Amino acid sequence: MSDSYLPPKVWVNNTNGNNQWASINRPDAGARFDRELPVGKHPFQLYSLATPNGQKVTILLEELLALGISEAEYDAFLIDIGESDQFSSGFVRVNPNSKIPALLDKSGEKAINVFESASILVHLAEKLGQFLPQAGAARTQTFNWLFWVQGAAPLLGGGFGHFYSYADEKQEYPINRFAMEVKRQLDVLDKQLAQNTFVAGDEYTIADMAIWPWYGNLVLGHLYDAAEFLQVETYTNVVRWAKMIERREAVQRGRIVNRSWGETWEQVPERHSAEDIDKVLKLRP
């Protein structure tokens, strides 16, 4: 382990080094440059990137469309966080926190900005009446697990994922600390899924859509290349659930929207109609 770090008396932002994310992030909020967001023709305007948080919303939208709910039609515009698109004046008006995903709901008399992935999921599920039980224990369980992932995923992503995959130096203590927590979270999920078909019970809900992009992708080997390191195969119920969700056509469609990397058949940087996804999926081997 490297020499002990002694924090200075007053913290100072250090932008030295070649780490892309260290040079982008700053301790202040707000717009850094003026640029309006593009606007399409559909009721919902999504500004996002196909990270796990972004996949949550596009999976829900594609599931709604799969049910024949035309009111869920949407335009999805790519926000390249590596190029600081999230700090444009237009994006900050939709999400003052400068994080993806962000949604502009133009279906009513006045446009509504919706940000934070869980808030967007609830907004769409309630508005269109799907994937969120209306009352009782089933609704409470869905919220329990939706809020669980909002608190848990930052420890997987910003914690384990950062130090295991993105940090300039591999450090034993933070990797071990967050690996332990991620394995504990997987065990929580595994025990829950041992008793239930889906995370919140016997019904497929927005809780599954919120959790799968993080923990489903992790155990399927699509996140951080850490499946062997974390021994994810031991969480048999999570693996069973992850594979079941992955087989859903709407999930396969939603996970590639606003994606600009990977195989050709999984890149749909912008989506304005079903055909934008159809023509890409035709390239699947």
Image (cartoon, rainbow, N blue to C red):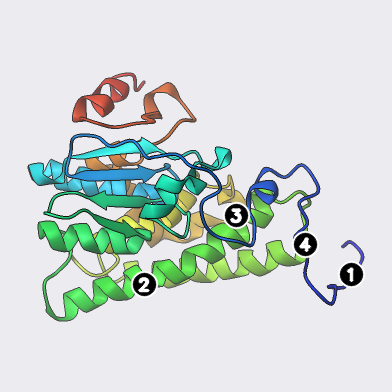
The residue at which mark 4 appears reads as 172
**Which numbered disc, 3 or 2, marks the residue that appears first in the sequence?**
2
Q: Measured from the top left, where is residue 131 in percent x and y?
A: 17, 60
Q: Nearer the viewer, residue 96 or 280?
A: 96
**The residue tagged with tag 2: helix, strand or loop?**
helix
**Disc 4 residue type (three-letter):** Glu
The residue at which mark 2 appears reads as 147
Query: Which image quadrant for residue 70?
Result: top left
The residue at which mark 1 appears reads as 4
Q: Is residue 93 visible?
A: yes
Residue at horizontal 63 percent and vertical 53 percent from the top: 25
Label 4 and label 3: CA atoms lie apart by 14 Å
Residue at horizontal 24 percent and vertical 31 percent from the top: 272
**Which numbered disc, 4 or 3, marks the residue that appears first in the sequence?**
3
Q: As drawn, which residue projects farthest toward the bottom?
A: 136
**Disc 1 residue type (three-letter):** Ser
User: Dots 4 and 2: beta carbons under 8 Å?
Assistant: no
Circle 4 or circle 2, nearest the eye = 2
**Which numbered disc, 4 or 2, marks the residue that appears first in the sequence?**
2
